[in-house]
Amino acid sequence: MISRARRLAIPLTGLLMVAGAMGATSTGAGATAAPGDVVTSTASESASQATSFWSPDRMRKATDATGDIDLSGKGKASTAAGPDGKPGSVPPIGQEGAKSPKSKQVNLPNTVGRVFFTLPKANPLDPKSWKYCSGSSVQGKYRNVVATSAHCVYDVKTNQFYDNWVFIPSYWDGDQAWNGKNPYGIYAAHTFHAHDDFVVKEDYDFDYAFVNVHSGFKVKWEKGKDNKWKPVFTNVGRLGDNVGGQGFAWNQKVKSKVFSFGYPAGPHPDGDKPYTGRTMKWCYGTTGAMPAAPRYNIQEHIGFRCAFTAGASGGPWLLKYKNSSRTGYLVGVNSVAWDTDKNDRYDHISSPYFNGDTYKVYKVAANRWTR
C-alpha cells in the first residue's frame, strides 16, 4: 500500500502548522513544529472543480495510488506500540436505530468509500495521474470528516498534497460507465490534516490523515448535444448527515478484534490479482504488534492477518463493529501490506497505533467547519 519512502527534509512553504490542538500557528518557509503538531493545508480546487473532474470514465481508469509494496520478512515484533496515556473514545453517529436481517455475512458500512485524486506537479489530463485509495466518514462536530492514510493525501515524491481530491462513500462501479459511482454523493476536500512527523520525516508510524470535506453533490452524467458526457449536480448536504460517521478511539489495547474495510485492487508480489477495486471488501482478525521496519521508520505498527493489496490503503479499522448499525470505533487505517513468510503473497496488513498524537490530529479536523 505504500511505495518506497525517501528520507528527505521537506520545505513547509504554504503549510499551516497547528501546535497540538490548541491553535497556535506559524507559517512560511522554514517553519518548524514540535512533536505532536498538525500540518494543515487547504485543497487547491473548489468543490465543483474537483467533483466535475471525476467523470465516470476517469474513475474507472484510475489506478491504486501506491504501486508496489516491498515489506517482507518475519523479524521481531515491535514492542513500542502501546498507549501513551489514558484511553479515550468518541461515539459514532448515524444509523443508530437501523435494523438489518440476521445474516452470516458482514453488513458493509455506508461510511466507507473510495478516495480519488490526481498527482501534484503532473498533467491532470494524463490518465497516469488518476489515482485512488480508500477512506471512511468519521464522527466530527460538523459531520464533515474523512479518515484515511497520510500517503493517500500527501505525495512524498513532490512534497505536496494531492489535487482534485474527492471521497465517494459506498462507491460502487456499475456494469456501465454511467452506473453506480456515487450513491450518497461526492464530497470534495476542503482541508487536509496530517501529522508533521509524516510530512517532514516520512515516518509511517504517523501514516494517518483526516480531511474536512465540503457538502456533497449527487452527480448524474448526461450526454449533451455534442455527444459528450456532462455532469448535472444536486446538492445533498453534509457527509455525516447522509451516511453517519464512525466513532474514534485511541490508546486502546494492542490486542483487539477489528474489522478492516477497503477497495483492494493491486496485485500480490507474485502478480496474482484477486481484487478489482470495483466493490468494497473486508477482513477480520485480532491485532498485535508488528515487526519494526527501519526503511519506513516503523516502530509502532499493529497488524493482523489479511490478504489486502494496494487500493485498500486508508480503509478503516473498526473496533466493536456492529452489523445492525454498521458502526464501530476507528482504531487504525490500512497503511502497509506485508509478506511475512516471503512467499510473494501479502498475508498481513498494518496500521499506525492510534495514540494521543493521533487524537490531536483528529481533534483539529473534528472541530473545523466547512460549507
Image (spheres, rainbow, N blue to C red):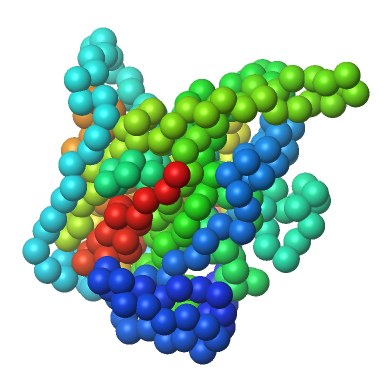
Between residues 1 and 207, which one lies in front from this camera angle? 207
Residue at the spot x=83%, y=21% of the render? 224
Extreme residue toward the right, this view: 226
Q: Quadrant of residue 4?
A: bottom right
Q: Quadrant of residue 21?
A: bottom left
- Note whether residue 294 is visible: no
Residue at the spot x=67%, y=58% of the render? 119
**Image location of residue 46, percent across then percent down:** 60, 49
Residue at the spot x=31%, y=77% of the render? 24
Left or right of 273 on screen, residue 27: left
**Image location of residue 28, percent across then percent down:** 52, 83
Extreme residue toward the top, this view: 101
Tell me the quarter of the image containing the C terminus.
top left
Extreme residue toward the bottom, this view: 30
Residue at the spot x=72%, y=66% of the render? 121
Q: Quadrant of residue 266?
A: top right
**Image location of residue 282, percent across then percent down:** 39, 35
283 lies above or below 313: above
